[in-house]
Image: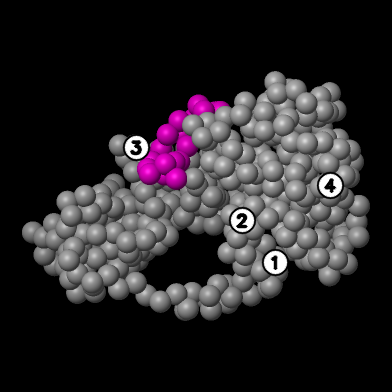
Amino acid sequence: MNTFVVDGVEYKIVRNPHTNGPMIAQVDGGQIDNRKEVCRQFLRMHGWTEEMFVGRITNDLERQINKIINDGHSPREIGNPGTGKKPSVVERLHPEMTQKDEIILHLTEKGTMTHRELSIAMYGDGIHLSNINESLQALVREGVVIRTGERPAYYSLSGKEVVIPEKPQKPAKVIQKKTEKNSSLLEITNENLDKVHNLVLKDPKYGRENDVITASLKAYPKNDNVALVAMKIALIDITNSTHISQHKQKVSIADLAEIIVGISNVDERIAMGDPEVVNEIARTNGEINLFSFASKYCCYHNHNLYERDDYAILDTVLMNTLPQYFDDIRKSDIENWRRNIDYKSYNDYITRKLDELGITTKDRRRKFDHFVWYLNR
């Protein structure tokens, strides 16, 4: 099985159940928070520039990764012509030394290193992670090297002390990066929210999907029939990439439909914007957290069916991007709300920020979601 590593996490290519095409998945079965960003990081390692990502959807990027790891093709090969791989510094000086030997050499000298640090030490850059992945993971399986933590993972020789750098340095870098990005982000104004919202509605893909969702909800507005609710769940799951089908071992669409139907006065509460309904759906059967899906399910019913604007959506794009727009929030804050299934705190935060910005346009929560998502997807 061909695998690749991004930020210390090992991925493989599987078949997408919806498109029948290639799709990335974690080797250990864990959930991927942002498939598109993982794809981008891998392709950057293989020479892709930012211009090459313009207009690319996630499925397209996954197909490109599949070509690279299975066929050895890359849109922009790096290093020696025809190989896509340049020799490391040690390989040039000591051709008899194996890649495993070189990894052990660097770990002996440095003690504890990340995958990227090993790539920099061996090749002078951080884009050759895939070149050393097979040897590095083989050393882990053989017990010569131990792996600690994830995102990033740290590697050290077995029996040696693992010294993981303290993390206080990282927030300073994040704050600096946020300041740089803030200056280039489109300003959040009533006019800009209206413009982007209209772009979404007119988009040949997303606009039509929104129309289909609206028509389906109006045809089957109630949440009192398991079969019909399951149909609506599947529709929102497919069009919004909430990946419920990937969790079928823990909760199936039928299970989730029964949970929604079983919520007391669910239709009346969604119509009035009760935030607790999101929490009740998100908790499901206690096996998984469906916070993102629950916010979308309630938002679509509340907005597309009842023409209200009580629910702000949360997805991976918003989770990753909100800290770039607002200085008083970090991704960890949003993750705490999601992990603790506290939708009201998240919804109240979005409402407060829109108030502070003077956003008064109709359907401002829905438009804000479209604004952030469409410009940063």
Residue 347: give x, y in percent of width and height. Answer: 76, 56
Q: Are marks 4 and 2 in contact (CB under 8 Å)?
A: no
Residue, disc 1: 325
Residue, disc 4: 273
Residue, disc 3: 70
Residue at coordinates 27% horizontally, 70% vertically from top-left? 162
Residue at coordinates 37% horizontally, 43% vertically from top-left? 27
Within-10-Å neighbours for mark 3: few <14, some 14–19, many 20+: few
Disc 4 versus disc 2: distance between alpha carbons? 20 Å
Q: Is residue 75 above or below residue 338?
A: above
Residue at coordinates 73% horizontally, 60% vertically from top-left? 345
Pick out the residue farthest to the top. 227
Residue 228: image quadrant is top right
Residue at coordinates 64% horizontally, 58% vertically from top-left? 337
Q: Which mark is residue 340?
A: 2
Q: Disc 4 marks which amino acid? A: Gly
Tell me where the magenta segment starts and ends, as one range: 12-30
- First of labels 1, 3 by sequence position: 3
Residue 332: image quadrant is bottom right
Disc 2 versus disc 1: distance between alpha carbons? 23 Å
Answer left or right for 102 relative to 265. Answer: left
